[in-house]
Image: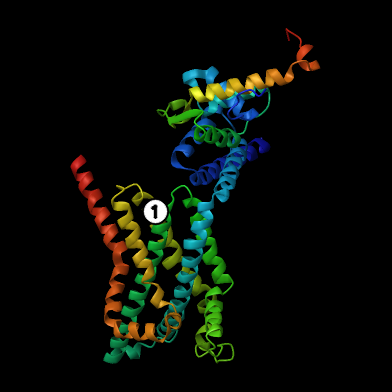
Amino acid sequence: MYHNVVEMIGEFEYLILTAATRLGDKAYGASIRNEIQKSVGRACSIGALYTTLDRLESKGFVKTWMGQPTSERGGRSKRLVSVTANGMQAASDFFNVVVRVSKGVSWATNRPTNR
Amino acid sequence: MGNEQTNKSITAICWRFVHYLSAALQQEEREAVLGDFAESGQNGSEALRDLLGLLARRQVTVWKDGRLWLTLASVVLPLGLLLSVISQTMVGEARVYTWMYANNWDWALTKSAGFWYVLGEVATQVAINSLMLACWSWSTGFLLGCLSTRLLPTTRVTFLLLIGIFQIANAPQRVIHLWMYLYGLPGLTSSIDTNAPVTGIAFYRVIFPYIVLCTLVALPAVWGARQGKVGSKVSPKLRPVLIIAATITILTMLPQIPGFGLLLGSSGRQWLWDNRHAMRMLLFLTCWPMLYLVATGFRRYRQNAASG
C-alpha cells in the first residue's frame, strides 16, 4: 500500500517551511535564517536560503513579497514569507514520512524524552 | 592596534565589494539581502562570502536555463561578431585618417581651401560611421535588455567578454579570410599592407581598436541594455514595436559587412545595386535609438512637470 505523497520536499525545504510557519507574520529572510541556525545548530547560507525560497515559491509552497523599509536594516526592505496551504501539506507529508520510516529503528525508539 | 586597523580596512573593502557585486542581483533581492546583512550584524568578509555563494547559485540556475543558450546562440554570438567586424572595418578607415591629420599635421596646409574641404568630408564620414556603429550597438543592447531582464546580467557580461575575445583573437579578420576562402577568392595574407606606416605604430595597431570597441560598441550596448530593461516594462502593446524597431536597425547592419554581397548571389547583388538609393534611405532607420531617447526624455520631462 502506498501513501499518497504528491511531491516529496527536501530536508532544507522542510526546515524553511517549518521555520516560516513558526515565525508567522515575522517570517522573512534574516529571521528564517536565525531560526534555522538556532534549531539546527549549523550555519545557514543566504545563497541556500534564497535559492530554496525561490524554488518553494515556484512550487506554490510559499508566497513572498517585499515589506516596508526599516531603520534596523539600514533602510532596506524585507522579503516577507508566508507558507501556503499546499506548503503546509507538503511539510506535513514530509514529517509523516520521516516518522513512518523511522518506526522501530533504535534512534527513534530509544530517544531520550528530556534533553 | 595595528591589527585592529588592518581588520577595519579589510572589512571596509569587503563591504565595498558586497555593495558593488550585489548590483548583479535583481533589485528586490538586492534590497532584501543587503537588509539581512545589516540586520544580522555580519562582518564584511562573512557578508562577502555569503553574497558570492548566492551569486554562484544564481549563475548555476541561469546557465541551466535553455533560454540563456538560445539568446547567446541567436543574439549575443552573431551580433557580437557582426559588431566586431564592422568595428574593425571602421577602425581601418578611421586610424588612417587620424594618423594622416594627427601625425602629419602641417599648419601650412590650413591655408589651402582643399585641405578644409577634404577634412570636412572625412570628419563627416567618420562621424556618420561612428554614429551608426554606436546606434547598432545600442540597439543590440536594447534587444538583449528587452528579451529577458532576468538573464540580462549574464548576457551583458558574456557579450562584453565575447567582443573582447573577438578583438584579441582577431576574429573579424579571420571571418573575412574564411569568407574569401569559401568563395574561392584570393587570400589577403600575401598582399602588401598598404597602411604599414599607420599599423607600424603600436597605438594605431593595438590601442586604437580597443578605444573604438569600448566607446562605440561596449558603452552604447551597455546603455542600450539598460534602456531595454526599462523599455521591457512598457505596455505589452508597445513592447513588440520596440523589439521590431531594434531588430530592423540591427538588420540594416548586414549590408555593411565586407563580402555581404557574396552571400546574395548575382541576382541579389543586382537587386541591391538597383535599389541602392532606397537602401541608403534604410540607413536612416539606424537612428531610431536617438528618436527613442528623445521621446522617452520628453515623456519623463512631462511626467516630472506634471508631478510638480
The residue lying at 29 percent from left, 52 percent from top is B238
Q: Secondary structure at mark 1?
A: helix
User: Which residue is identified by label 1?
Assistant: B146
At 43% from the left and 58% from the top, the residue drawn is B222
- Residue A104 horizontal side relative to residue A51, left or right: right
Query: Residue B156 or B181: which is nearer the viewer?
Result: B181
Question: Where is residue A72 drawn, in percent x and y?
Answer: 47, 26
Chain letter of the residue beneath label 1 in the structure image:
B
Residue B270 at x, y percent in the picture: 35, 86
**x and y, in percent, of residue B103 in the image:** 45, 84
Give the image location of residue B251, x and y in percent: 38, 69
Q: Is residue A24 left or right of residue A102?
A: left
Q: Residue at x 44, y 38 (%)?
A: B28
Residue A105 appears in the rendering: yes
Badge 1: few (under 14), some or many (20 or more) residues near its Cα, within 10 Å? many
Please say if B184 is above or below A46.
Answer: below
